[in-house]
Image: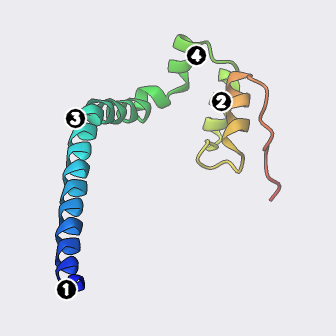
Amino acid sequence: MRGEGGGCAQERERAWVSGRIEEALRAFEAEMSARTGRKVELSHDSIDHLHSPQYIDPHFHDASLGAKNLDQVLSLRAAGISAAAAHVGADYLEAMMWGSGGGEDGPVAG
């Protein structure tokens, strides 16, 4: 009757392997949390900066990054037109603002 005792041994082995896998996953999760915590924090700080009123102001980019077409951007904003209201792709808006070429998905007719 080897089959009866073997089943119990297999269950113990499965439980042992399952416990080892759980241990390894917990250790991995703890290590990754420790390694990435600061990166996540810095990412949140970047988001706060990129969405700040200063960063959204076209004058900031003109002064610090040498943006082109500032007058064009300001006239569009004065007319109530912004990136949020435009029906264009992000590449097109960047090309228009920075003069970087590209911008394959231009204005959509509508």
Q: Earlier in the sequence, mark 2 or mark 3?
A: 3
Q: Are marks 3 and 4 in contact (CB under 8 Å)?
A: no
Of helix, strand and loop, which one carries label 1? helix
Q: Are marks 2 and 4 in contact (CB under 8 Å)?
A: no
Residue 5: quarter of image: bottom left
Callout 4 amino acid: Asp
Q: Nearer the viewer, residue 10 or 57?
A: 10
Of helix, strand and loop, which one carries label 3? helix
> Disc number at residue 73?
2
Q: Earlier in the sequence, mark 3 or mark 4?
A: 3
Residue annotated with mark 3: 34
Front disc: 3 or 4: 3
> How far, Cα to Cα, is label 3 from label 4?
39 Å
Q: Nearer the viewer, residue 62 or 7?
A: 7
Q: Which residue is at 61% across, 44% downward? A: 80
Q: Are marks 1 and 2 in contact (CB under 8 Å)?
A: no
Instruction: Tell me: 62 left or right of 17.
Output: right
Q: Earlier in the sequence, mark 1 or mark 4?
A: 1
